[in-house]
Image (spheres, rainbow, N blue to C red):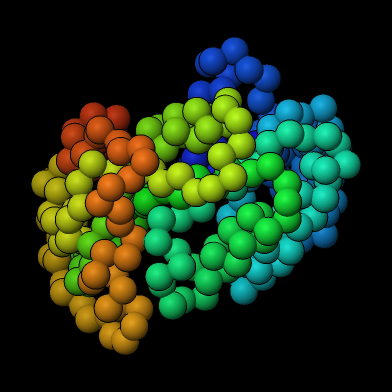
């Protein structure tokens, strides 16, 4: 599991272990299997003896293309040499519709994986409840939450992790599979749910998102009305259970 210490990666590793598989959490900070996709350091050792590699690596820096695009090439080469039979790439629903640097990189990463000839599956997910809650918690420190006109469809990461584990257990799909939350709604509604669920007294401030980027988000580019896998836990229900404790922890820190 490349990116095994991230929000999704931890969930996938836990789910695969629960199902009786051997699973390695691999990343730059991993004690046993430390890798660097930008240079290829540690990749050969990390994938040795593996049947399936799930790549949930992430990089939002200016070096994102080196990590995600060139890094995918390095990873696939290491997998070929090690005899890995299935590469699972984790990506983002609608990334090709967003004219913004990071999403272009994710689109390029998908192209590299699909064009390589290696047996692959691409699992596209919508945003995670956890990341929405983290964002709201961070900006709420200033007693205001900016709410652009945008439509999202967030999903609990545990449900996305199960979907990724299902794909990893199966034969390579050689196509994309989409995983999305149960509800498509405006960012404002998600922010209202967070404010109500956490009891935080914050103002919601409408902000414009101009240009093609804003238009794409308003049109719901990051959503999927008919996903292959649909989550069952709405954002407000997640907040009322374990998520509320996590959301409150962010705001209190």
Q: In this view, does 93 lie to the left or right of 23?
A: left
Give the total of numbered labels: 0
Q: Quick one: 112 or 129, which is closer to the camera?
A: 112
Q: Is residue 1 left or right of residue 75?
A: left
Q: In the rendered view, tell whether residue 44 sits above or below residue 115.
A: above
Locate the N terminus and report the quarter of the image it occupies: top right
Q: In the rendered view, tell whether residue 246 sits above or below residue 75.
A: above
Q: Quick one: 186 or 98, which is closer to the camera?
A: 98
Q: Can residue 142 be seen in this view?
A: no
Query: Residue at 51% of width from left, 24% of height from top?
Result: 15
Counting from the top left corner in percent of width and height, residue 164 is at 50, 35
Query: Residue at 79% of width from left, 55% of height from top?
Result: 74
Residue 95 position by quadrant: bottom left
Counting from the top left corner in percent of width and height, residue 140 is at 25, 60
Q: Is residue 40 visible?
A: yes
Query: Residue at 14% of width from left, 48% of height from top?
Result: 193
Q: Quick one: 133 or 44, which is closer to the camera?
A: 44
Counting from the top left corner in percent of width and height, residue 46 is at 80, 37
Question: In the displayed image of the protein, which residue is found farthest to the top?
Answer: 20
Q: In this view, does 37 lie to the left or right of 182?
A: right
Residue 68 position by quadrant: bottom right
Query: Residue at 54% of width from left, 15% of height from top?
Result: 19
Question: In the displayed image of the protein, which residue is found farthest to the bottom?
Answer: 211
Counting from the top left corner in percent of width and height, residue 4 is at 61, 38
Q: In the rendered view, tell whether residue 13 sits above or below residue 125.
A: above
Residue 219 position by quadrant: bottom left
């Amino acid at each position: 599991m490349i990116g095994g210490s991230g929000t999704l990666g931890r969930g996938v590793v836990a789910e695969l272990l629960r199902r009786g598989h051997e699973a390695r959490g691999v990343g730059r900070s991993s004690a046993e299997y430390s890798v660097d996709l930008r240079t290829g350091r540690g990749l050969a050792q990390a994938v040795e003896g593996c049947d399936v590699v799930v790549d949930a690596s992430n990089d939002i820096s200016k070096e994102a293309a080196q990590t995600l695009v060139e890094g995918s090439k390095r990873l696939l080469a290491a997998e070929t040499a090690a005899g890995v039979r299935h590469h699972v790439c984790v990506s983002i629903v609608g990334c090709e519709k967003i004219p913004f640097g990071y999403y272009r990189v994710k689109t390029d990463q998908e192209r590299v994986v699909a064009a390589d000839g290696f047996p692959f599956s691409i699992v596209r997910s919508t945003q995670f409840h956890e990341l929405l809650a983290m964002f709201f918690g961070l900006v709420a420190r200033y007693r205001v939450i900016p709410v652009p006109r945008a439509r999202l469809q967030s999903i609990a990461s545990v449900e996305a992790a199960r979907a990724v584990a299902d794909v990893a257990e199966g034969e390579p799909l050689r196509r994309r599979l989409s995983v999305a939350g149960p509800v498509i709604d405006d960012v404002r509604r998600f922010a209202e749910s967070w404010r109500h669920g956490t009891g935080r007294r914050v103002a919601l401030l409408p902000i414009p998102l101009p240009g093609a980027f804003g238009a794409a988000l308003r049109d719901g580019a990051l959503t999927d009305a008919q996903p292959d896998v649909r989550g069952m836990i709405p954002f407000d229900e997640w907040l009322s259970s374990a998520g509320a404790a996590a959301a409150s922890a962010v705001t209190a820190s």
